[in-house]
C-alpha cells in the first residue's frame, strides 16, 4: 500500500508541475499578444516574428520536457 501511495503522490506532483508549465506559457502568450497591440507600427512585424519564434521554442521545450 505504501508503494502505491508513493507512486500516486509522485504522479500528482509531476502532473502539477506540468500544469504549472502550461499555465505559465498560456499567461505569457496572452501577455505577449496584448503587448503586440501597443507597440509602434514600424516595430510590429519584427515583434510578431519574434513572438512566433518564441512560441515555436516553447512548444519544442515542452515536447522535450514531456519525454
Image (cartoon, rainbow, N blue to C red):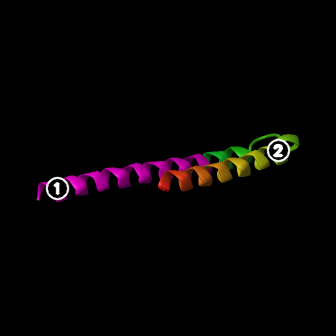
Residue in front for this viewpoint, 42 or 60: 60
Q: Distance between the residues labelled 2 and 1?
A: 53 Å
Q: Quadrant of residue 11?
A: bottom left
Identify the secondary structure beneath mark 2. Answer: helix
For marks 2 and 1 on the same chain, the one whose residue lies earlier in the sequence: 1
Question: Going by the picture, which residue comes out furthest to the left?
Answer: 1
Q: How crowded is mark 1: few (under 14 residues within 10 Å), some or many (20 or more)?
A: few
Identify the secondary structure beneath mark 1. Answer: helix
Q: Name the residue under label 1.
A: 3
Q: Residue at x 77, y 49 (%)?
A: 48
Q: Name the residue under label 2.
A: 46
* Horizontal and vertical percent position of residue 38: 74, 43
Camera-nearest label, 2 or 1? 1
Q: Give the range drawn in magenta.
A: 1-30
* Horizontal and vertical percent position of residue 5: 17, 56
In the picture, measured across the screen, residue 43 lies left or right of residue 8, that is right
Residue in front for this viewpoint, 41 or 16: 16
Q: Residue at x 18, y 59 (%)?
A: 4
Amino acid at each position: 500500500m505504501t508503494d502505491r501511495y508513493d507512486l500516486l503522490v509522485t504522479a500528482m506532483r509531476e502532473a502539477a508541475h506540468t500544469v504549472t508549465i502550461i499555465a505559465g506559457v498560456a499567461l505569457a502568450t496572452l501577455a505577449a499578444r496584448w503587448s503586440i497591440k501597443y507597440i509602434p507600427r514600424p516595430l510590429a512585424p519584427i515583434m510578431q516574428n519574434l513572438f512566433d519564434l518564441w512560441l515555436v521554442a516553447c512548444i519544442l521545450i515542452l515536447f522535450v520536457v514531456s519525454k
